[in-house]
Amino acid sequence: GAFSDMTSIVDFEIPDSVVTIGDGAFMGCRNLKNVVIGRGVQSIGSHAFQEDRPEYVLFKGKTIEQVRAMENYTWQIPNPSTVIHVTD
């Protein structure tokens, strides 16, 4: 993926202009703690956050129902203890 195995990434904001987070985009980014997902994101690829343990994920411009609708068998909220926030 685009940022795979980049262990130096701790905080990352995906711009509003991004529509898709690709397959394995952040796979292996073991130090990733905080992610802000822009308003434009409509889909998240398989294993996008595999092996990651973000503590906080903010979905801009989404309802929790819209976030849940993006989940599938290949991508799920990566950690049961992850705090998910949505905002207008």
Image: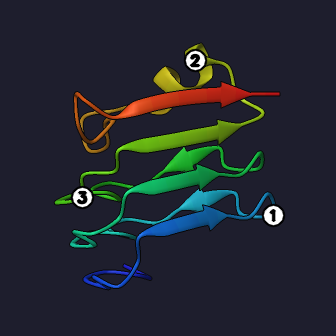
In this view, the residue farthest toward the top is: 65
What secondary structure is marked by label 1? loop
Tag 3: residue type? Asp
- In the depicted structure, whether residue 2 falls above or below residue 54: below
Q: Which of marks 1 and 3 is nearer the N terminus?
A: 1
Residue 11 in the image, given as x and y percentages of width and height: 50, 66
Residue 7 in the image, given as x and y percentages of width and height: 27, 82
Relative side of 57 to 7, left or right: right
What secondary structure is marked by label 2? helix
Residue identifier under label 1? 17
Q: Residues within 10 Å of mark 2 (few under 14, many from 20)?
A: few
- Mark 1 and mark 3: Cα distance apart in space: 23 Å
Q: Residues within 10 Å of mark 1 (few under 14, many from 20)?
A: few
Relative side of 60 to 1, left or right: right
Colour scheme of the picture: rainbow
- Mark 3 and mark 2: Cα distance apart in space: 21 Å
Residue 62 quadrant: top right
Residue 33 in the image, given as x and y percentages of width and height: 37, 57
Residue 82 in the image, given as x and y percentages of width and height: 33, 34
- Mark 2 and mark 1: Cα distance apart in space: 20 Å
Q: Which mark is residue 5?
A: none
In this view of the protein, which residue sits in the foreground, 31 or 71? 31
Are discs 1 and 3 less than 8 Å apart at CB? no
How many numbered markers are drawn? Answer: 3
- In the depicted structure, whether residue 88 falls above or below residue 29: above
At horizontal 24% and vertical 35% (from top left) the residue drawn is: 73
Residue identifier under label 3? 52
Tag 2: residue type? Ile
Residue identifier under label 2? 64
- In the depicted structure, whether residue 47 falls above or below residue 68: below
Q: Earlier in the sequence, mark 3 or mark 2?
A: 3
